């Protein structure tokens, strides 16, 4: 197994992984706000690549014998003038996606992928890394906590009854 920068020959496998993750998120969303649109597979992938290409980002795949076992994508946070009014605005890497296929979970691959991205962020002098995780994805939250991440912001949510 090796971790390499994504190559277009792996795009379709990564798109499949993104769709499977979105299906899972839709399944566990108790407010039923997440969807899997017909255009998600291609458009979301394109948006993610654009974020990486435009914002000092990288996409890496863990591959073994041509099969993608895991994927991580990240980019550098871009701040605007409003952000600078009440925030220090350090150079911060954003891990936008981290996915490990079901058969490779609990093998340490997720930690290797996240470490690979963290090392990239260090190489471009980021001071922090941020990962947003869906609140109901308890497995992902547990994984991130085990890898040294902690809560900084919490979004609270309430459905209004009409």
Image (spheres, rainbow, N blue to C red):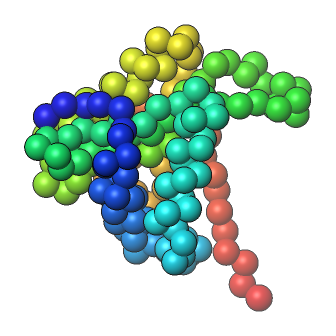
Image x and y of residue 48, in percent: 54, 48
Residue 54 place in picture, x, y as percent: 64, 34
Q: Quadrant of residue 1?
A: top left
Is 142 on the left or on the right of 43, as rendered?
left
- Which is more toward the observer, 6 or 57? 6
Total numbered labels placed on residues in the image? 0
The reply, left or right, for residue 103 in relation to residue 138 is left
Horizontal arrangement in the rendering, residue 8 relative to residue 56 (left or right): left
Q: Which part of the image, by quadrant, shows the C terminus?
A: bottom right
Q: Residue furthest bottom?
A: 162
Residue in view at x 17 percent, y 46 percent: 66
| Image height of 84 relative to 71, above or below | above
Expressed as whole percent of the image width and height from the top left, the position of residue 56 reads 58, 26
Q: Residue at 45% across / 72% down in the picture? A: 26
Which quarter of the picture shows residue 159?
bottom right
Q: Residue at x 34, y 62 (%)?
A: 16
Residue 68 shows up from this direction? yes
Residue 71: image location, x then y, percent? 33, 43
The outermost residue toward the front is 9
Seen from the viewer's position, the closer of residues 8 and 116 is 8
In this rendering, the answer to whether 22 lies above or below 50 is below
Q: Residue drawn 19% across and 31% down?
A: 2
- Is any part of residue 140 visible from this angle? no
Image: 71 above or below 32: above
């Amino acid at each position: 197994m090796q971790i390499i920068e994504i190559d277009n020959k792996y795009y379709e496998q990564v798109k499949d992984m993104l769709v499977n993750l979105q299906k899972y998120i839709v399944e566990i969303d108790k407010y039923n706000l997440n969807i899997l649109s017909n255009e998600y597979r291609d458009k979301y992938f394109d948006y993610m690549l654009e974020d990486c290409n435009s914002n000092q980002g990288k996409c890496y795949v863990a591959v073994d014998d041509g099969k993608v076992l895991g994927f991580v994508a990240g980019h550098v946070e871009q701040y605007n003038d409003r952000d600078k009014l009440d925030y220090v605005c350090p150079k911060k890497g954003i891990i936008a996606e981290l996915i490990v296929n079901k058969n490779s979970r609990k093998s340490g691959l997720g930690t290797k992928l996240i470490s690979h991205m963290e090392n990239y962020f260090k190489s471009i002098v980021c001071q922090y890394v941020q990962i947003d995780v869906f609140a109901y994805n308890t497995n992902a939250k547990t994984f991130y906590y085990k890898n040294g991440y902690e809560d900084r912001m919490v979004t609270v949510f309430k459905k209004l009854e009409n």
